[in-house]
Amino acid sequence: MTYEQIFKKAIEKAVKNNWEIVNQKVVDYEIDEFDNIFLFWNDINIQFDIFEIIFSHDFAKAFWGEEEIEVEIVENFIGKKNNDHIYYYQSSWRYHLQQMILEEDPIKYLEKFL
């Protein structure tokens, strides 16, 4: 899938999941040839760079959801036995946003969830 196709499908998914920016639901969008995105809501049209969008909390909440997921801590801790696993709960959007930032190609990370 091309980056443009990934962007479009990711934006469509977020819009379908009631994506809001500043408490206003995004109702439509347009992506130009320079990877700028124009978002529309309540007769307002604002231009963003696509990376401003995909790394934003509002987009991540709509794209991955706000449910809590169980996450394993992989670092070694003092006193941790070899077979012990330590888990904590984190919102899905926050976890995936952190993972996407660590990826060499964050767009391909997004693609996994389309």
Image (cartoon, rainbow, N blue to C red):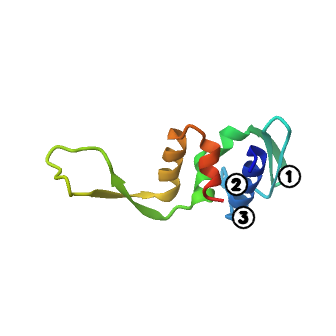
The spot of residue 92 in percent (x, y) is: 49, 58
Give the CA distance from mark 2 to mark 3: 10 Å
- Answer with the quarter of the image where residue 65 lies: bottom right
Residue at screen point 59% across, 48% down: 109
**Left/right of residue 7 with respect to residue 85 in the rendered view:** right
The spot of residue 18 in percent (x, y) is: 69, 63
Which residue in the structure is indicated by mark 3? 16
**Contact (CB < 8 A) between labels 1 and 2?**
no
Can residue 88 be seen in the rendering of this structure? yes
| Nearest the eye: 28 or 7 | 7
- In primary-sequence order, the first of circles 1 and 2 is 2
Type of residue at label 2? Ala
Type of residue at label 3? Lys
Give the CA distance from mark 3 to mark 1: 19 Å
- Of circles 2 and 3, which is in front? 2
**Contact (CB < 8 A) between labels 3 and 1?**
no
**Left/right of residue 12 with respect to residue 68 in the rendered view:** right
- In primary-sequence order, the first of circles 2 and 3 is 2
Which residue in the structure is indicated by mark 1? 43
| Nearest the eye: 104 or 43 | 104
The spot of residue 106 in percent (x, y) is: 60, 42
Looking at the rendered image, the quarter that the C terminus falls into is bottom right
Type of residue at label 1? Asp
Residue at screen point 58% across, 56% down: 61
| Nearest the eye: 110 or 59 | 110
What mark, if any, has residue 10 been given in the picture? 2
